[in-house]
């Protein structure tokens, strides 16, 4: 099978996947406890006003009718109107998406590079104190909850030593578009990225890389490279790691979508104005359209990330597309 036909087939497979995402996200949101009309009306609202709110947002309709209306909106590329902000959901998501992408992409790249380097170093020194230190450290990081590690970093770097800001994305007193604004963004980004990298991405990539390199190190081509006089560093980083990178790249595609889960906690903890923080606010306010819009966005993100991963794997290893 050619690479173009392989890509076309993978794109067609996204259609039923996205339909499933729409159905499941609608079901999860509407089966969750809580009445959005009561929350929107406020704690002192009368029954008449709650009923008026319910009619205004179409919540008095049957669940099937609400689903059909939602699908009709999606066909017109309309994600609906947010209950809590009265803004189009698509507009809300587009305003918050850049902050989340910046956080996730930075933590993914940092975790991927450090994980592959440290994982290869651990495999090269298999069984040594350095291997035990790196492997034990990754296990310790993976055991730390995101919110616990984030609070610890805030306590040390923001409260105790006052080196970095504890929340937000920018200082309102810094002029936008200047070098000072760029430095300010990096300072605000550092703690959330370190938290997400240390507790989420780095341990996973490190362990997968270490296992893959150890397996590749037993292959004949590695022994051949060593017999030709290549240094141990070149044997592991240029030969063994090259074979072990495919599972790591595949995992990176899956992890990109799952990182949204970690971003919800991280953005909420650090007051990072991204999609994760918006999802937390939407859940608290029972904002059905905004919740379903974020779930759909996450589903599309996972599907596209997997498609890109498969294409990259097929490009690096043509045997993938042949299968």
Image (cartoon, helix red, strand yellow):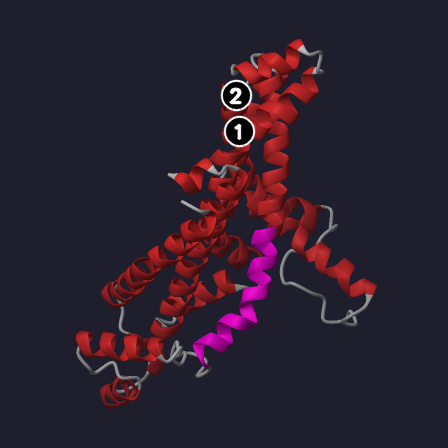
The relative height of residue 48 versus residue 168 in the rendered view (above or below) is below
Mark pair 1, 2: CA separation: 7 Å
Mark seen at residue 278: none
Residue lying at 81% horizontally and 63% vertically, measured from the top left: 180
Q: Which residue is mark 1?
A: 244
Asked if one can make out residue 271 in the rendered structure from this viewpoint, the answer is no
In the depicted view, which residue is nearer to us: 304 or 73?
304
Residue lying at 59% horizontally and 63% vertically, measured from the top left: 99
The relative height of residue 242 versus residue 87 in the rendered view (above or below) is above
| Secondary structure type for disc 1 | helix
Disc with the residue nearer the chain's start (1 vs 2): 2
Residue 231 is a magenta residue: no
**Badge 2 local density, few (<14 within 10 Å), some, or many (20+)?**
some
Q: Position of residue 278 (x, y in %)?
A: 48, 67
Question: Do tag 1 and tag 2 residues touch (Cβ < 8 Å)?
Answer: yes
In the depicted view, which residue is nearer to us: 64 or 57?
64
Q: Position of residue 31 (x, y in %)?
A: 23, 64
Asked if one can make out residue 54 in the rendered structure from this viewpoint, the answer is yes
Image quadrant where residue 72 sits: bottom left
Horizontally, is 38 left or right of 139 in the view?
left
Residue 95 is a magenta residue: yes
Q: Which residues are magenta?
A: 88-105
| Secondary structure type for disc 2 | helix
Q: Which residue is mark 2?
A: 216
Image quadrant where residue 267 sits: bottom right
Q: Position of residue 131 (x, y in %)?
A: 59, 18
Horizontally, is 208 left or right of 188 in the view?
left
Q: Magenta stretch mostly in which secondary structure?
A: helix
**For the C terminus, which image quadrant?**
top left
Residue furthest out toward the right: 179
Horizontally, is 265 left or right of 110 in the view?
left
């Amino acid at each position: 099978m050619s690479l173009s036909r392989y890509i076309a087939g993978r794109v067609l497979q996204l259609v039923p996947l996205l339909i499933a995402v729409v159905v499941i996200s609608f079901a999860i949101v509407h089966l969750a406890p809580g009445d959005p009309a009561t929350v929107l009306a406020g704690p002192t609202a009368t029954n008449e006003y709650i009923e008026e709110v319910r009619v205004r947002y179409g919540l008095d309709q049957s669940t099937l009718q609400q689903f059909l209306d939602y699908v009709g909106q999606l066909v017109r590329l309309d994600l609906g109107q947010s209950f809590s902000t009265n803004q189009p959901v698509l507009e809300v998501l587009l305003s918050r998406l850049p902050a989340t992408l910046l956080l996730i992409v930075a933590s993914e790249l940092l975790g991927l590079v450090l994980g592959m380097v440290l994982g290869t170093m651990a495999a090269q020194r298999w069984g040594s104190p350095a291997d035990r230190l790196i492997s034990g450290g990754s296990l310790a990081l993976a055991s730390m909850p995101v919110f616990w590690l984030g609070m610890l970093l805030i306590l040390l770097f923001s409260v105790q030593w006052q080196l970095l800001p504890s929340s937000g994305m920018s200082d309102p007193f810094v002029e936008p578009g200047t070098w000072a604004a760029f430095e300010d963004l990096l300072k605000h980004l550092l703690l959330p990225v370190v938290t997400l990298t240390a507790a989420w991405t780095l341990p996973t990539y490190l362990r997968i890389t270490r296992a893959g390199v150890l397996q590749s190190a037993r292959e004949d081509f590695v022994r051949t490279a060593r017999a030709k006089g290549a240094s141990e560093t070149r044997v592991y980083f240029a030969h063994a790691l090259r074979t072990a990178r495919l599972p790591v790249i595949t995992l990176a595609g899956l992890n990109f979508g799952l990182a949204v889960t970690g971003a919800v906690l991280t953005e909420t903890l650090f007051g990072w104005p991204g999609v994760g923080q918006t999802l937390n606010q939407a859940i608290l306010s029972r904002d059905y359209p905004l919740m379903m819009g974020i779930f759909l966005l996450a589903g599309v993100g996972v599907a596209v990330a997997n498609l890109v991963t498969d294409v990259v794997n097929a490009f690096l290893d043509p045997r993938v597309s042949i299968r």
